[in-house]
Amino acid sequence: MLPSRQDPPATPLVETVAAHARQPLLERPGVRPAFVRQVFRDLGLPYVSNGVIGLIFSASGPIAVTLAVGAAGGLTEAQLASWVFGILFSGGAATLAMSLLYRQPLGFAWSIPGTVLMGPSLQHLSFAEVVGAFFTSGILVLALGATGVVRRIMAVVPMPIVMSMVAAVFLKFGTDIVASTQANPVVAAPMVVAFLVLTAVPVLGRFLPPVLGTLAVGCLAVAVSGQFSFQGGGPILATPVFTPPEFTWAAQLELVVPLALTVLFVQNGQGIAVLRAAGHNPPVNVFAIVSGAFSLLNAGCGAVSACVTGPTNALMTSSGTRQRQYTAAVVFGLLAMTCALLAPALTRLMLATPTEFILALGGIAMLRALQQAFVTAFATTFTLGSLVTFVVTMSGMSLFNIHPAFWGLVIGYTVSRVLEHADHAGPKARLKSATSAPSVKASAN
């Protein structure tokens, strides 16, 4: 009787990919959706604070980047207002719907790297050609999400390597605290002191969350120092403007693939890593599909692609009970849609505050997320791959108009696969290697 053939044992990588392949294409929520009564039951001051801070963060610096890129590219005031309306409304609507459905803080916004990518392109492409690339990129993201390939690819890259990319991207928020305190101590220094006091004294922190206290002290410092310069006049309500797209080979080849990769693996990758580190289970394929669908909505307003946002999700999961953090996303989503309708007035309001106020507030709110990213990236395994990912991402290397965070993941993962065999072999192999090492040494003696 011939011995039965046995298949070779599956490696952890094969097992992981196979497990994800067996999952349904659209990840199920696993819980009942949250309705109004449940939201009010779970809502609390820390979650309102986190949602408000997330909105302030999204509607300040990122909006300023959008306005700067659009103005440099020759966009009209109406086109810029339409862009701001599109990104705020789609981000708020996607966040609200997904967070209520999954009862997790699933925050959407827009691609800041994609916005920066537009700058050079608008110098030699018409805005209609760029809008055509927005539409095509949205369709590509939607199609890739529908195939399920995104989840399988992201299952391959170990969490420490992904979190090292997140740490590199988030590091700028930490250094912004130091830079803003040095540049404008009258505003930033009281904010830092308020955060330290409220964090160090738990009794005070229970009545006034540290980040919310930081916001209040910062607003008071801005007002007292006379650095709030609001310019009145101009429209208040946003009026979306549809720009008929033009589909040219030049724009498609230059922008579509970089935009799609940035959304799926840089922006969404950050958001997924942050949410997993906070104990949530984000739906990777649904993220990609929703990002593609809302990117098409954005393109109709002449706006850049929608995506899951790492910084905003970090802010919304920075405090409170995990099961109730979705209410912070609900607050963020409702405020974002409201602000979308008031996009012109909101833009003038946020730009009236000193830059250091926004930088210090965002940096302080991101400290916990930055700390968690470093701990996850370098505490245990895949440390060399994580270090390479961190260094490449920080280097700013940009090939083929694709964000350096993407190349950090690719190069860091490749180096890890080549040089960190034991880590990729799985915990059982590492344990066997560790237990066999003394016996080998003893036999050598």
Image (cartoon, helix red, strand yellow):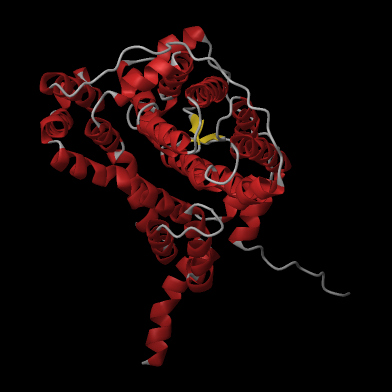
Q: Relative to residue 55, is residue 355 drawn left or right?
A: left
The residue lying furthest to the bottom in this view is 445
- Residue at figure coordinates x 41%, y 48% from the top left: 166
Position of residue 354 measured from the top left corner of the image (x, y, whole percent): 23, 29
Give the quadrant of the N terminus. Answer: bottom right
Residue 25, position in %: x, y?
A: 70, 38
Q: Is 182 rendered above or below residue 427?
A: above
Identify the residue shown where x is 39% and y is 26%. Answer: 59
Residue 36 visible in rendering:
yes
Q: Image point 39% across, 60% down: which residue?
A: 395
Is 225 rendered above or below residue 400? above
Q: Nearer the viewer, residue 432 or 222?
A: 222
Q: Is residue 186 left or right of residue 104?
A: left
Residue 106 position within the rendered picture, expressed as x and y whole percent measured from the top left: 50, 29
Task: Please tell me which residue lies in front, 245 or 35.
Answer: 245
Give me the residue at 71% from left, 38% from top. Answer: 146
| Number of numbered markers | 0
Residue 188: quarter of image: top left
Q: Is residue 47 visible?
A: no
Q: Is 278 or 109 nearer to us in this picture?
A: 109
- Location of residue 290 by image quarter: top right
Outermost right residue: 1
User: Which quadrant holds the C terminus?
Assistant: bottom left
Q: In front here: 190 or 241?
A: 241
What x and y, as percent, mark residue 35? 53, 11
Depicted 410 relative to depicted 352: above or below: below
